[in-house]
Image: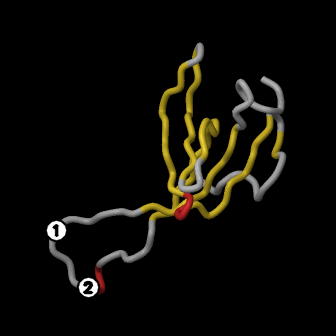
Amino acid sequence: MDASGINGYPLVSVRWKDAHSEHGWAALVEINHLLAPCSSIGWKIHETDESVTLAATHSEGSWNDVQVIPKVLIVSQTTLQPGGLSSGEGLPSP
C-alpha cells in the first residue's frame, strides 16, 4: 500500500455524532438529550455533497463493513498514512 491507500482510496479517521434512542418510560430530566459521539476508521470509497462512505475491509476488489455517514454529522475527518498521520487532528479518543 502506498500513501494514496488501496487503489487510490485514502484511509481516514472520521469523528461524528449520531442519533440514539431510548425505550421505556422516563422523566424528562432522566432523558439523555445529547448526540452520541462516534469514531470510525476506514477506506474512503465514495464522497458526495451529503455523505462520506467508508469501508473497513477490502479483499480482491470487494469491500465489506460499509458505512455511509451524513456530512452534517461529521465533526472532523483525518487522512491517515502508514506509520503516521498526514493531516487533520489525529486519531480519535477511545
* Residue farthest toward the front in the current orientation of the protein: 49
The residue carrying mark 1 is 24
- Identified at 49% across, 28% down, the residue is 64
- Identified at 58% across, 49% down, the residue is 48
The N terminus - image quarter: top right
The vertical placement of 94 against 8, above or below, is: below
The C terminus - image quarter: bottom right
The image position of residue 14, as x and y in percent, is 62, 52
Is disc 2 placed on a helix, strand or loop?
helix
Q: Residues within 10 Å of mark 2 (few under 14, many from 20)?
A: few
Horizontal side, residue 71 vs residue 86: left or right: left
The vertical placement of 58 against 91, above or below, is: above
The image position of residue 31, as x and y in percent, is 30, 77
* Residue farthest toward the bottom in the current orientation of the protein: 29
The residue carrying mark 2 is 28
Residue type at the position of mark 2: Leu
Residue type at the position of mark 1: Gly
Q: Quadrant of residue 93?
A: bottom right
Q: Quadrant of residue 57?
A: top right
